[in-house]
Image: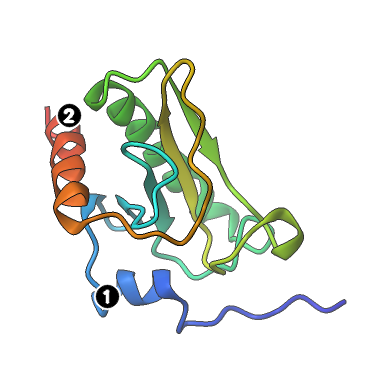
Amino acid sequence: MAEASYDPSNIFAKILRGEIPSHRVYEDDAVVAFMDVMPQGLGHTLVVPKAQSRNLLDADPSTLGPLFTVVKQVALAVKKAFGADGVTVLQFNEPASGQTVYHLHVHVIPRFEGIALKPHTGQMEKPEVLAENAAKIRAVLNG
């Protein structure tokens, strides 16, 4: 089966271009981190490279260093911001893995003992909750 090509109309590409609003917690020349609008847990954040790639399998290797450097920074920040016991870091590749948005992205989710992740139901979080959570993460990232 042939690999599909990158579709610049995907939702994360639109967020990166500012066509769709997001609650950003971090941005540099290569990477953006923002709140997941359908969080599976408190503080669920997405880390997305600005470079175009469907997923890890077709990403230029030069994209990965900056991406995962920010993933680590965000993981440390969300753990501290929410007083989490741990952090789950997830990354999906192609439909069989559960990937639904075809722009490389990494989920960073603070975790708490005894609390399971919420199912991905498509239920959107209230914008004011996302804004409050983003502010908590930015406060930690900005020292």
Q: Position of residue 44 (x, y in %)?
A: 37, 42
Q: Quadrant of residue 94?
A: bottom right
Q: Residue at x 50, y 36 (%)?
A: 117
In this orientation, which residue lies closer to the viewer: 22 or 111? 111
Pointer 2: what residue?
140
| Callout 1: SS | loop
Left or right, 111 with reference to 78: right
Secondary element under disc 2, as helix, strand or loop, is helix
* Residue at the right extreme, as displayed: 1
Residue 86 percent coordinates (x, y)? 44, 19
Q: Viewed as shown, does residue 70 lie left or right of 138?
A: right
Vertical comparison of 72 with 1: above or below: above
Q: Which residue is mark 1?
A: 20
Of marks 1 and 2, the one in the foreground: 1
Q: Position of residue 19 (x, y in %)?
A: 26, 80
Depth order, front residue of 59/90: 90
Task: Give the quarter of the figure containing the N terminus.
Answer: bottom right
Residue 87 vs residue 31: left or right? Answer: right
> What is the number of the mark on residue 59?
none
Residue at the spot 27% in from the left edge and 75% down from the top edge: 20
Q: Is residue 80 left or right of residue 104?
A: left
Q: Earlier in the sequence, mark 1 or mark 2?
A: 1
Q: Quadrant of residue 139?
A: top left
- In percent of width and height, residue 143 lies at 12, 27
Amino acid under disc 1: Ile
Q: Amino acid at mark 2?
A: Val
Disc 1 and disc 2 in contact, CB within 8 angstroms: no
Rendered residue at 52%/52% (across/down) = 120
Q: Residue at x 47, y 40 (%)?
A: 68
Q: CA distance from mark 1 to mark 2?
A: 25 Å
